[in-house]
Amino acid sequence: MTEKLKYKRMVLKLSGEALMGGDSYGINTKVLEFVATEVKEVVLAGAELGLVIGAGNIFRGVAGASKGMDRTTADNMGMLATVMNSLAMQDALERIGVITRVMSAIPMQSVSEPYIRRRATRHLEKGRVVIFAAGTGNPYFTTDSAGVLRALEIDADLVIKATKVDGVYDRDPVFDKSAVKFDYLTYDQVLQKGLRVMDAAGIALAKEDHLPIMVLDMGVAGNIKRAAMGEKVGTLIAD
């Protein structure tokens, strides 16, 4: 089935908040199961998939720093929280038969493999899902930047930014019903318009290597597979 895929190797970026579902904190198992099912579908279609998961459902470094905590300490805590989310996602995937490896930028061999680029690529070639945990391993960098960085390192064809809305808008559609959705944007337009798709560092990295980013609604079944097949889903950010 791989001949139908426009993008063979991809990185799926999920926010930690997305894992909360309707809860106010933590990990909603129903959401985990849904995402795992969506990931399995695209893997069965022949895609090679890496995941990067944020930590906003557990601890956000920027928020901690804004309350007086040392920024480096807060970011380190946030990176550790991404490992918790990654292990939860690994469990959900393996319970439905998807072989998964968690690779952490912060070494913790008792629960994950250390991130080694060549090993990650080999896992993908063998059809395993790789979850890249602990961001870049450095403070001051978001998991958005980590998602783009890992995608570039493994020579991915596409970054999928899965959100709660169906693309990028000129204003927040949750609060402004007159907000206009963009079907296509260039990297420069995202930066110039100040659109909060992902942080500027991530967009700049993608621009430098011409890595397309697809922003879509994670809650719609089949969206990830449709994006992999090159269908018009959400908003495409490219040259």
Image (cartoon, helix red, strand yellow):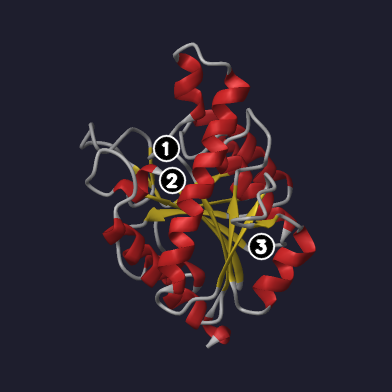
Residue 230 numbered tag: none
How far apart marks 1 and 3 lie (CA) works out to 25 Å
Q: Nearer the viewer, mark 1 or mark 2?
A: 1
User: What is the residue that sits farthest to the bottom in this orientation?
Assistant: 1
Give the secondary structure at mark 2: loop
Specify the amino acid type for callout 2.
Ser
Mark 2 and mark 3 in contact? Answer it, CB < 8 Å: no
Q: Nearer the viewer, mark 2 or mark 3?
A: 2
Give the secondary structure at mark 1: loop
The residue that mark 1 highlights is 56
Specify the amino acid type for callout 1.
Gly
Residue at screen point 30% across, 62% down: 220
Residue at screen point 68% across, 72% down: 123
How far apart marks 2 and 3 lie (CA) works out to 19 Å
Mark 1 and mark 2 in contact? Answer it, CB < 8 Å: yes
The residue that mark 2 highlights is 15
How far apart marks 1 and 2 lie (CA) works out to 7 Å
Residue placed most toward the observer, 69 or 170: 69
* Count of numbered labels shown in the rendering: 3
Specify the amino acid type for callout 3.
Ala
The residue that mark 3 highlights is 156
Work out whether mark 2 precedes mark 3 in sequence or the reverse, and give the earlier one.
Answer: 2
Work out whether mark 1 precedes mark 3 in sequence or the reverse, and give the earlier one.
Answer: 1
Residue at screen point 42% across, 44% down: 16
Q: Position of residue 238 (x, y in %)?
A: 59, 51
Examine the rendering and report whether any part of residue 180 can be seen.
Answer: yes
Q: Position of residue 203 (x, y in %)?
A: 61, 40
User: What is the residue that sits farthest to the right in this orientation?
Assistant: 118
Q: Where, by quadrant of the figure, is residue 204 drawn?
A: top right
User: What is the residue that sits farthest to the front in this orientation?
Assistant: 110
Q: Position of residue 5 (x, y in %)?
A: 54, 78
Instruction: Decide: few, some or many residues near mark 2? Use Cα within 10 Å; few <14, some 14-19, many ≥20.
Output: many
